[in-house]
Image (cartoon, grey):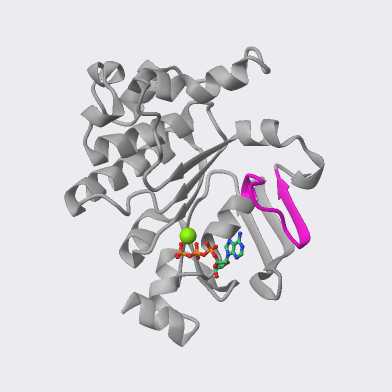
Amino acid sequence: MGSMIRFEKVSKSYGEHVVLREFNLEIYKGEFITVIGSSGSGKTTFLKMINGLVFPTTGRIFINEKDISTVNLTSLRRHIGYVIQGIGLFPHLTVRKNIDFVPNLLGRHNKGYNRLTADRLIEIVGLAPEMLDRYPSELSGGQRQRIGIARALAANPEILLMDEPFGAVDEITRKMLQSEITRIHRELGVTIVFITHDIREALTLGSRVIVMKDGQIEQDGTPGEIRQSPRTDFVRELIN
Ligand SMILES: Nc1ncnc2c1ncn2[C@@H]1O[C@H](COP(=O)(O)OP(=O)(O)OP(=O)(O)O)[C@@H](O)[C@H]1O
Ligand SMILES: [Mg+2]
């Protein structure tokens, strides 16, 4: 398996405050990584470094074996979908226009790259084609979340970053979205980095789970390894 994302001794500080400490991590193509840890442990900061929204204080980050400090950020982000909680769809645009927004924007500068159509994407996220003509206010929270995923997939990215994407939906919708994202991962083979507060979600969805504490990796292993041999008290408490 090829390397998709690599962090080499990455540290991030804001003034005196160290948020990430000598972070070393390699993520391979097609992995489904879940990230869990206490609030303020640096999860979002880590995720935003992957698409260049936050820069390291020291250390290097490679995407597809390229140091991202040397690449054009717009073309980097073209390969990376980003889903956040509450996703911020444009209220004055239909679902179709919301989904096509980024590819249209990029398409002006990058002709002919392999994008997915809104019709295909609505099917991928398990919604009826009629939804394409609605406005975000005419959808349920779970449906809006699916549109957020469709929009992140629209440029046919190699990497999908998800920051607590299912945090705001009810338990039943959450279960449905979980099986949907598992199927999308299998179907598209996209590399996923998924932050969650929910240990069950982390262990169910991830092919590998990263547990973070105070800006460091507390444990990095398969769900089985985390369950059977928690390395620290922190991890042990998390799974209990
Ligand atoms: N722009 C910033 N300036 C100063 N401090 C920041 C900035 N962004 C984040 N931090 C601090 O860095 C730490 C890590 O933040 P981060 O958002 O990565 O945490 P997190 O693990 O995602 O937490 P949560 O689970 O609450 O979302 C926090 O203490 C936060 O206050
Ligand atoms: Mg966060």
Q: In this view, does 26 lie to the left or right of 240?
A: right
Q: Quadrant of residue 73?
A: top right
Q: Is residue 35 left or right of residue 79?
A: left
Picture residue at 39% right of the left edge, 33% below the top:
89
Q: In this view, does 88 lie to the left or right of 173?
A: right
Q: Picture coordinates of residue 225 (x, y %)?
A: 45, 71
Nearest the eye: 199 or 107: 107
Q: Picture coordinates of residue 104 (x, y %)?
A: 54, 17
Magenta residue check for 201: no
Total count of labels: 0
Quadrant housing the C terminus:
bottom left
Q: What stretch is highlighted in magenta?
A: 50-63
153 is higher (above) or lower (below) than 110: below
Magenta residue check for 55: yes
Q: Picture coordinates of residue 17 (x, y %)?
A: 65, 74
Q: Which residue lies furthest to the right in this view?
A: 70
Q: Which residue lies furthest to the bottom in this view?
A: 233
Nearest the eye: 29 or 180: 180
Q: Picture coordinates of residue 197 (x, y %)?
A: 38, 64
2 is higher (above) or lower (below) than 197: above
Ligand 1: image quarter? bottom right
54 is higher (above) or lower (below) than 37: above
Picture residue at 51% right of the left edge, 67% below the top:
221
Q: In this view, does 164 lie to the left or right of 53?
A: left
Picture residue at 35% right of the left edge, 28% below the top:
91
